[in-house]
Amino acid sequence: MTETATLITQLRVLAQLTRTEAQVARLRVTQANTDDVRDDLRQNAADADVRAARIVGTLNDLGALPDPVTPLIGRVATLVRGAVEQTQPLDEALLGDLALEHQLRDRARYVAALAEAADLPAVQALAADLEAAHTETVHWLTRVLTDLAGGHAALNASPLQQVAAQVTRAANSPARPALDAAAATVSHTLSHAVDRTAGTVTDAAGQVADTAVSAVSTGRDVAARTVDQVTRLLPGTEAPDTDDAPGSDTEPVAPPISGFADLPPHVAVAALRALDNFRDVAAMLEFEQSHGNRPGVVAAARLRATAVRR
């Protein structure tokens, strides 16, 4: 009985992950470079749908109660995953796909062991088919990554993934101007993309989707804090000394940019980049830290202060 209960739990997880696998394959279709790759991805998505249906059928045969909540959560999680992966370069997103396939294959092997212990040959046969399918997909993704490393990409990076790749290259390069430009661009572009994704999630899943919106917003804050940390760690990007900035030892004065606290983050970043005077940028940094303290805006202010100080 214990083996059967555990088996049902694992099959439900497999069904949810398999639905995610199908959605990821459909997302990748839009990034395919050739018709052959598009056909492969469409077939992968269709095969994943069939596998998910087989798993659900097996759960019914085992007498598992219907689970209407898990599929909904799975769809929301897929939307959140799609938003978060857009903050990564294409190779990192593909490595995430590969990790998903490895997890599916390992869980299929575990299900096979549980089915053997529970003397359920039909479930063993299903697990063997799942393991074979995921092994094949692991090999396919490995080839795609190998081709990408060799400069023959089967998939195109999305616009946001291209920006993320630029930020990654800049963060690992001694060339500061590239990081300055890329950080401001990713702050602007990511803000719009996450807002659009949040709207889609709300339409798709009601109250459960509201939780996903919070997760997406948290992801955006984490991304902004990452840019902030990068600026702190790179040589010559320490926070500017604001002791000589306006208002440092006196009552606060109006910031150089009127209404700055009410500006959307991407507009605030663009306004900061228009400043050419270090004292003005330092004053804006001090103002932002004492008011909204938005991570992306603070990071952009530090970057701009470093640029105009030279």
Image (cartoon, helix red, strand yellow):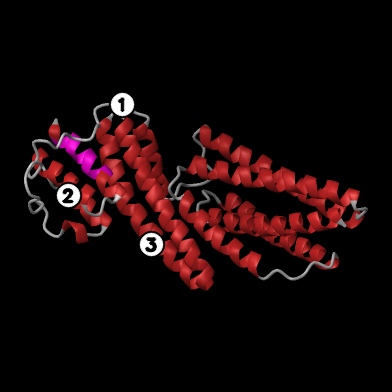
Badge number at residue 195: 3
Say if mark 2 contacts mark 1, CB within 8 Å: no
Query: Would you place residue 152 above or below residue 63 in this image?
Result: above
Tell me how far mark 3 sits from mark 2, CA to CA: 26 Å
* Residue at the spot of label 1: 174
Which percent across, then down, holds residue 7?
A: 80, 55
Q: Amino acid at mark 1?
A: Pro
Q: Earlier in the sequence, mark 3 or mark 1?
A: 1
Tell me how far mark 3 sits from mark 1, CA to CA: 32 Å
Left/right placement of residue 133 relative to residue 42 reads: right
Check the image and name the residue furthest to the front.
250
Q: Residue at x 49, y 34 (%)?
A: 151
Residue 309 visible within the image = yes
Please tell me whether mark 2 sits on a helix, a strand or a loop. helix
Which percent across, then down, holds residue 172?
A: 37, 30
Query: Which of the two residues, 207 or 92, is positioned nearer the viewer here?
Result: 207
Q: Amino acid at mark 2?
A: Phe
The span shown in magenta is 299-308
Q: Residue at x 74, y 47 (%)?
A: 107
Query: Would you place residue 304 above or below residue 61 in this image?
Result: above
Please tell me whether mark 1 sits on a helix, a strand or a loop. loop
Q: Residue at x 41, y 57 (%)?
A: 217
Badge number at residue 287: 2
Give the mark toward the camera: 3 or 1.
3
- As for residue 101 lying within the magenta part, the answer is no
Tell me how far mark 2 sits from mark 1, CA to CA: 30 Å
Query: Which of the two residues, 54 or 292, is positioned nearer the viewer here?
Result: 292
